[in-house]
Every structure is written in C-alpha cells, then in structure tokens.
Image (cartoon, rainbow, N blue to C red):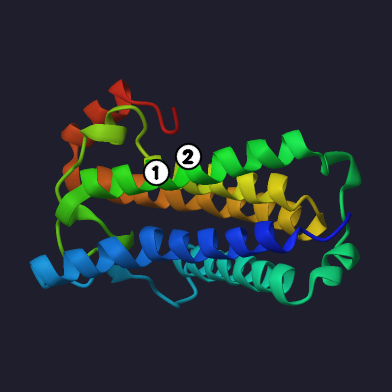
C-alpha cells in the first residue's frame, strides 16, 4: 500500500477534525448553552455501559492517531497490514462518499434531536422521544452514521488497523444501542414500544 498523497492525507485530517467537531462538540455545546444540561453523560464504572464507553473512546483515539500518522509519517501506513486488493481509486472514492454522506446524516439527526441530544445514557434528566427527521427512518440514525463513517475510513485507508476499528466499533455500537433502547423503553413505556414497532433499529 502506497502512502496517501499529501493532499488526500491533509483532506482526511481536515475531515476527521470536522467530524469530531460536528459529531461530538457542536451539538453538545449548543445543548449545554440552551438548556444548562451537560449532554456528556458517559461513565467510567465497571458496567457494560462503562465498558462500551471506554471501548468507543479507544476506537476514536486510534482513528485520530492513524490520520495524524498518515499526514506526519506517511511510510508508517505500509507497516499497518495494508489490504492491497482494496487499494483502488474506485474504492477510495466510495470511501470518501460514505464519509461525507455519514457526516451530513449525523448532523441532520443531531438537529432533529434538539434538546434531547446526549452522548451516553442520561438517567438524571428525562428527554423527549424523538420520532421526526432521520428518526422516522431509523431508531438509531447517529449510530448508523457512525457505522457508515468507520466503513468509509476503512475504504479510504484499507489496512488491518482500520479493519480492526471497523469490527470493534460495530460490536460496541451493537451493544450500546441495546442499552439505550432498554433505557428508552423504561422511560417512555408504550410510546417507545409503539415506535419500535413502526421504525426499524437501523433502516
């Protein structure tokens, strides 16, 4: 696998920073300012929820480290188990399309959530059940966008590390959505049960 061209590596770093700002910072700051509620409700305890949170942080930090390495130390990519069969222009273009599309989708889902936006499970504040926008098509549109995002990154940088990130992210998000669904069922009862009957978990 040859290193990414400097321009593409720079674009990937720019995209990654934009993704983190949109997916985790932008809406969180907005909700905090408008409601006074901190939407960051992650935990570091030894529960399944805490384990998933730590795992996802690991996945995201690995992503940032990989992208920085692609810019600062391009030859390093050759030592990360490149999957040469996927290193094709068409595959890379598909990866970029998935990255950009997932970012737009995630931003739209966050706007639809409004004041209900949270990173994690908020057991202290009862949030409204959102059923509009992307939530009318998927019960978990933000996690869906994150899954597509990891796939896009894998196609842009096809190697053993991005494949491992894709698999780890998939497993962790599958657990997290079930934890969140159990919470929403407990909070919203029949309304959430009705929503589950009408809208699929993913698409």
Residue at (73, 68) in percent of width and height? 70
Q: Residue furthest front?
A: 7
Q: Are the residues tagged 1 and 2 within 8 Å (C-beta)?
A: yes
> From what the image shows, is residue 190 above or below residue 77?
above
Q: CA distance from mark 1 to mark 2?
A: 5 Å
Residue at (66, 73) in percent of width and height? 68
Left or right relative to 71: residue 183: left
Residue at image mark 2: 101
Q: Which mark is residue 155?
A: none
The answer to whether one can see residue 121 in this image is: no
Residue at (14, 57) in percent of width and height? 126
The front one of 9 and 62 is: 9
Q: Residue 31: image x %, image y %?
A: 18, 64
- Which element type, helix, strand or loop, lies under badge 1? helix
Q: Residue 202: image x %, image y %?
A: 45, 33
Residue at (37, 71) in percent of width and height? 42
Q: Residue furthest top?
A: 198
Residue at image mark 1: 104
In what quadrant of the picture does the C terminus appear? top left
Left or right relative to 171: residue 135: left
Q: Residue 151: image x %, image y %?
A: 63, 44
- Which element type, helix, strand or loop, lies under badge 2? helix
Q: Residues within 10 Å of mark 1 (few under 14, many from 20)?
A: some
> From what the image shows, is residue 31 above or below residue 170?
below
Q: Residues within 10 Å of mark 2 (few under 14, many from 20)?
A: some
Q: Residue 129 occupies which quadrant of the picture?
A: top left
The front one of 157 and 10 is: 10
> From what the image shows, is residue 130 above or below residue 38?
above
The answer to whether one can see residue 76 in this image is: yes
């Amino acid at each position: 696998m040859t290193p990414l061209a400097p321009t593409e590596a720079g674009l990937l770093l720019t995209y990654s920073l934009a993704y983190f700002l949109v997916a985790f910072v932008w809406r969180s700051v907005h909700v905090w300012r408008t409601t006074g509620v901190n939407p960051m409700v992650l935990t570091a305890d030894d529960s399944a929820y805490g384990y998933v949170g730590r795992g996802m942080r690991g996945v995201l930090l690995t992503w940032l480290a990989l992208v920085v390495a692609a810019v600062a130390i391009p030859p390093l990519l050759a030592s990360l188990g490149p999957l040469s069969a996927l290193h094709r222009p068409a595959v890379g273009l598909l990866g970029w399309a998935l990255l950009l599309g997932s970012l737009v989708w995630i931003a739209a889902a966050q706007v639809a959530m409004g004041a209900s936006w949270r990173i994690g499970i908020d057991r202290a504040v009862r949030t409204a059940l959102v059923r509009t926008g992307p939530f009318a098509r998927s019960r978990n549109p933000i996690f869906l966008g994150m899954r597509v995002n990891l796939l896009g990154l894998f196609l842009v940088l096809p190697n053993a590390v991005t494949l491992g990130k894709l698999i780890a992210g998939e497993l962790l998000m599958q657990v997290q959505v079930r934890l969140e669904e159990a919470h929403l069922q407990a909070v919203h009862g029949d309304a959430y049960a009705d929503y589950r009957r009408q809208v699929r978990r993913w698409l």
